[in-house]
Amino acid sequence: MYTVEHWINGAATPAGSTRTAPVFNPATGQEQARVLLAETSDVDIAVAAAAKAFEAWGESSLSQRVKVMFAFRELLVAHEDELARIISSEHGKVIDDARGEIVRGREVVEYACGIADALKGSFSDQVSRDVDVHNFRQPLGVVAGITPFNFPIMVPLWMHPIAIATGNTFVLKPSERDPSASRLVAELYAKAGLPDGVFNVVNGDKVAVDAILDHPDIAAVSFVGSTPIARYVHERGTASGKRVQALGGAKNHAVVLPDADIEYAANHLTAAAFGSAGQRCMAISVGVAVGTAADKLVKTLERKANEVKVGPGDDATNDMGPVVTEAARERVIKAVASGADQGATVVVDGRGLTVDGHENGFFVGPSLLDNVTTEMDAYREEIFGPVLAIVRVDTIDEAIAVINANPYGNGTAVFTSSGEAARKFQREVKVGMIGVNVPIPVPMSYYSFGGWKDSLIGDSPIHGPEGVRFYTRAKVVTTRWPHTEAAFNFPTSN
């Protein structure tokens, strides 16, 4: 048993209080560590360290920042196996899935390695006689990230590399359920040459969150989590004058048209619904089967769901690990029961799954519900577990209408061999990220990640060009080197 401490000003730091929370191994159900829970005073110390570090880091050269990012990227590669094992042991996802999130997070570090290009300003010569105009962007100061349990390294990596590369200093509040990856990331930053205080980790619960949202020296907050908490973070953070990125929940639909390759679609829907035990904000939780595709799709999905091998994440032969907590397991079980009670057909029932040798683990198997309607709880609620609900409709127009009526708009997909249908879908659907024969359309790092409607509170997506804009503010400079007397008339472009 060990205790996960904070990381402040370049060193492991104990808390100002003795409050701790358990860190479980979801595969065994056993507590494997304790994590310190910060008080407001701990956040104050971290912010003070970051503010002091910003005095130098904010004036550092682009070359210095990029050099650190290149070194950090190489360390992420070198420690990929160690990070994957840590993630699997605390989250429960299988090792290969953990490696996948490391790679997707590392792509943002690679984008940050080219930050000099993203920060280039513009110049306009001779806008008026002997007058030039140029602009440039500067960092905000101390910024913070509040991140969820489901991607303990990827989501933070979508935030802090861009924030740091643009000259800010960072305070991270990771999920207290799986905090150890963030601690190792802090150590890797130090090895990469990042000065003390530029990156800090404060573990905690709502006390730490509120301290971050209220702190007058934090200029911006990035958040990923459920929609109710995203609203809370956005309202409280903006009320105290901060910029806020607040990404919320999801109910992602995948439409399967009759002309689709059903085997291909079912393969990808199975992986997208049950990978990481469905604990992804981009997981497909609703399959919309159109017309004659429905029966064949459900039959194929049933076969593939029953083929998913569930077990501990450190076994490379497993496809899916446990959910993160016992409470999460009970929520999934309740959702499947609710679907059955409200008239859905339980095609595959994962509620009774047990894993030999891991009877106390937080395991629940893949569940497939057919004949789900949009009034059912299994459709309306964000289950965040391995449950795929099938809604049947007659036409693509009905499928689009179902998606557009849903309050969430994070990601969606269409499976079809028709370019006409795909173009219609991508133009008419009210969702921020769209896949055509791609079930989980997470953009590359040089685009930005963000949904519509209740999946994004406010208007600031994460990483990519939008991330650069979020962590910097622009200055526009108008310049004249006079050699004549000043005129009293209003300046014009003559």
Image (cartoon, helix red, strand yellow):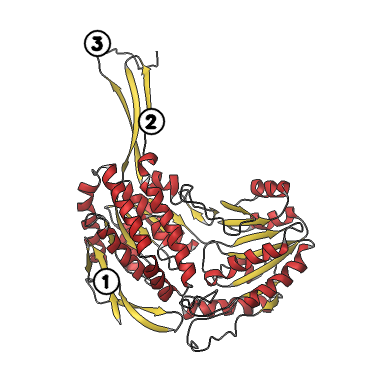
Q: Are marks 2 and 3 in contact (CB under 8 Å)?
A: no
Cβ atoms under marks 1 and 3 closer than 8 Å: no
Q: Mark 1 points at which residue?
A: 5
Earlier-in-chain disc, 1 versus 3: 1
Q: Is residue 319 left or right of residue 292?
A: left
Q: Nearer the viewer, mark 1 or mark 3?
A: 1
Q: How crowded is mark 2: few (under 14 residues within 10 Å), some or many (20 or more)?
A: few
The answer to whether 468 is drawn above or below residue 266 in the figure is above
- The reply to whether residue 371 is visible in this rendering is no
Residue 16: numbered disc:
none
Residue 304 in view in this figure: yes
Locate residue 10, reporting x and y percent.
22, 61
Among numbered discs 1 and 2, the one appearing first in the sequence: 1
Q: Which one is nearer the viewer's eye here, 16 or 98?
A: 98
Residue 183 placed where, x, y %? 31, 67
> Which residue is under mark 3?
485
Q: What residue type is labelled 1?
A: Glu
Label 1: element kind: loop
Residue at screen point 40% across, 72% down? 85
From the image, tell me which residue sits under label 2. 122
Position of 190 compared to 86: left or right? left
Specify the amino acid type for callout 2. Answer: Ser
**Image quadrant in which the N terminus is located:** bottom left
Q: Distance between the residues labelled 1 and 3?
A: 64 Å
Residue density around tag 1, few if under 14, some if 14–19, many if 20 or more, within 10 Å: many
Which of the two residues, 39 or 27, is positioned nearer the viewer here? 27
